[in-house]
Amino acid sequence: MERLATTLFFLLLAAASGRACNAPFQEVGDSCYYIETELKLGWSEARAFCQSMGGYELGDLAVFSSCDAFTVFTGYLAFNAPADSAFWVGAHTEFIVNNWRWVDGTVLSTGVPFFAYREGDDNEQDCAAMDSSSFFQLADFACEEQKPFVCQVPKHGHGRDTREAVRPVTLDCPADSVQVGEFCYWFSDIIKTWDEAEYHCRNNFQVNLGELFSPASCEEFTKMAHHLEVAERDKSHWVGAADATGDQEWYWVSGDPVSGGAPFWATNEPDDHYNSNYCGFMSSYRRFYLADERCTSSHYFICKLHTV
C-alpha cells in the first residue's frame, strides 16, 4: 500500500505539468508505460495494481494495438529492463486453450509478431509475459507466478484506441499469384538456392517489379507469416533477407535494414554466422519467424509483385 500511495502522489503532483505522460509513467511510442521491476505479483494482482494506478477506466496491464507498437516497446525493454527478466502484460487465455486475448477484449493471435515461436502448449500456462530470453516477445506462464509487470495508461487527451477496421482492397493479381494483405505474391512449388530464387523473382516477374519477399512493414511480415501457417504450413521459404558482407549486417533486397529481434527473427536467430549462414528464410519450424541458413541450401521461395 505504501508503494501505491507514493505512486498516486507522483501522479497528482505531475497532473498539471502538461506532459503527455505523468510520472512515474514514461512515454514510449503512442502510449504511457510504467515498468515495475522491484515488486513481483501474480498476474491478477498485477492487473489490480495497474488499474489502481491509472483509474479503473484507463489504467491496466499493458496491451499493444499493433505490431509496430509492440516492436517499439520490445526495443525499449531491451535497453531499460534488467537481464533475465519477464514482465506481465495484459494478455491471457479465455475459456479454451490458446484463445488468447488482450485485457481490452481484442483477439491476440499466436505466433508472429507477439509470441515467441515455442508458444502453444496446453500446459495450464494461461497468462503471458514479455520475456527477455525471447527478445521480449510473449511467452506463456502460470498466472500464479510472481513477476514484475508493465502498466499502461493513454497519453493525455488520447483515451483508449478504438481500432477502426480497415476495409481490404481486392487486387487483380497476375495468374498463379495470390493476394495476401495489400500485395500480390507468387509462391514457388519448386526449391532453389537463395541466389537462384532471387534471380527467378527478378527475371520472371520483370513487368511486376518482382523481388524476393521483402516486407515494407511489420504488419506485412505478420500477414505473410499467418498466411504461411495456414496455406504453406510444412514449407520453409527463402525471403529477401541477406547478410551480403558477412559482417552480421542484414538487409532486405529492397535496401531496408532487417532489424534484430522482434518482429522478424526467431529466438536466438541469426545464430550461425561462423558457418556462413548469410541468407534468411521463414522457417516452418519457427512459426515462420526468420532464421539464417547457408545460401547454397535449397528452399521454396516467395516473390513479391509490386505492380499488378
Image (spheres, rainbow, N blue to C red):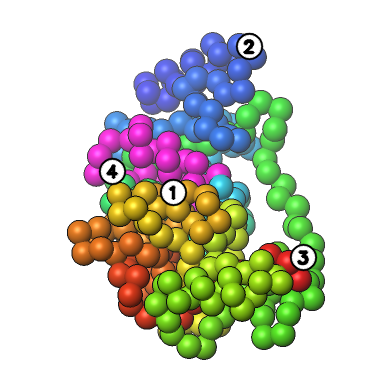
For label 4, the crowd category at 10 Å Cα-Cα, with few meaning under 14, some 14 to 19 and many 20 or more, is some
Task: Quote the CA–CA distance across marks 1 and 2.
Answer: 38 Å
Mark 1 against mark 3, which lies toward the viewer?
1
Q: Is residue 76 magenta?
A: yes
Q: Is residue 8 above or below residue 283?
A: above
Taking the spot 20% from the left edge, 59% from the top edge, the residue there is 274
Give the quarter of the image for residue 218.
bottom right
Residue 266, percent across and down? Answer: 36, 61
Mark 3 against mark 4, which lies toward the viewer?
3
For label 1, the crowd category at 10 Å Cα-Cα, with few meaning under 14, some 14 to 19 and many 20 or more, is few
Taking the spot 52% from the left edge, 32% from the top edge, the residue there is 28
Circle 4 SS class? loop
Residue type indicated by callout 3: Pro
Residue type indicated by callout 2: Ala
Q: Is residue 229 magenta?
A: no
Q: Is residue 90 above or below residue 191?
A: above
> Which span is picked out in magenta?
69-91
Residue under label 3: 168
- Asked whether residue 206 appears in the rendered view, the answer is yes
Residue under label 4: 85
Residue 25, percent across and down? Answer: 50, 26
Circle 2 SS class? loop
